[in-house]
Image (spheres, rainbow, N blue to C red):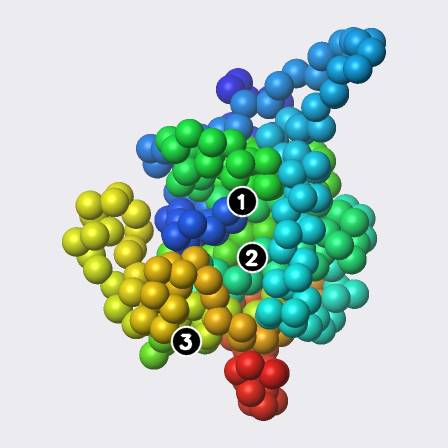
Amino acid sequence: MPDTPDRPATIDLAGLDEHAGALLDPLVDEAVLAGEPGRDLVRLRPSPEPVPPIEGERRSDVDRWGRSEHVRDVARQIYDPLYRYWHRVEWEGFEHVPTEGGALLVSNHAGAIPSDAPAIMHGVETQLGRPVYGLAENLFRAIPGLGTMWSRLGGVAAHPDNAYRLLHDEQQLALVFPEGTKGTGKHYSQRYQLHRFGRGGFVEIAMRSGVPVIPIAVVGSEEAMPILWKSNRLAKLLNIPYFPVTANMLVMGPLGIVATFPAKLRIRVLPPVHFNLPPNQERYSRARVMDESEHIRRLIQDALYDMLRTRRSVWFG
């Protein structure tokens, strides 16, 4: 896709997420190292001339990113009982999620099939009525039907130009998990210990887009599907980042492959982090980017420790 004069030719998003891929998570998580094979740019369709509808014809609601609000609405109806009665999601600081303008939501991420991503998306979309796009690698694009469904649910290929367009041009909310698969693939003994946030790519794209980062801390997803052991051999065979053996599989049998434990999810939204730098600069200080990345990681880590100190029970909060 040719470069446009109002934005730099390349954007290094390295470290936005380390590698794509929590197993079977439609928002898988990890954005990308620019230029790696398989990191695709979403080709935006030009806006066609309006065509008068044919009587009885159903007009598609699929947007230029492949997201369908109809599919999202069906997904919200299916997921809502899990959100309300299974995980009993509780929010703090929800007022920090902006009601307008672009923003990059950045959160910790955990569990073999993470519970945090759908909970964050569902809560923001139902309470604010704003769509949330998940910047992630589409692991399912080669599987007929699943790749399309991933896009219909709000997944966007984690390419720097896509992130820029969402945040700067369209002023949307985008969700990313900078720990990458190191977060979702953690052993239960490492729960709530955040890994390094890549190389700070998420900070750089927020600076370049001129939007704030909204740090989010989630407690409960670590216990919803804890990993007890990982098989490297099966992971290589299936070409996936890791193959987990979870407590859910041992307790529930085959159902435990997809079913989570009813751990209560608590989500704390922290005040926005603004960088007060002009957008669209050709370069940003690498030291500043890394310092801001570590600052945001520490904010989320401290919030997690505080939430754990006041939690009475994994199941009841």
- Find numbered disc 2 in the image and state the secondary structure of the residue it sits on: helix
- Residue for badge 2: 117
Q: How far apart are marks 2 and 1 (CA)?
A: 11 Å
Q: Nearer the viewer, residue 59 or 15?
A: 59
| Left or right, residue 250 beside residue 173 | left
Q: Residue 272 occupies which quadrant of the picture?
A: bottom right
Q: Distance between the residues labelled 1 and 3?
A: 24 Å
- Vertical placement of residue 254 versus 68, above or below: below
Q: Residue at x 53, y 28 (%)?
A: 42
Determine if residue 104 is in view. Answer: no
Instruction: Give the total number of marks visible in the rendering.
Output: 3
Instruction: Pick whichever of labels 1 and 3 is earlier in the sequence.
Output: 1
Q: Position of residue 115 (x, y in %)?
A: 52, 62
| Left or right, residue 40 beside residue 240 | right
Q: Which mark is residue 191?
A: 3
Amino acid type indicated by mark 1: Leu
Q: Residue 135 carries which label?
A: 1
Q: Distance between the residues labelled 2 and 3?
A: 17 Å
Amino acid type indicated by mark 2: Ala
| Left or right, residue 242 beside residue 66 | left
Instruction: Pick whichever of labels 2 and 3 is earlier in the sequence.
Output: 2
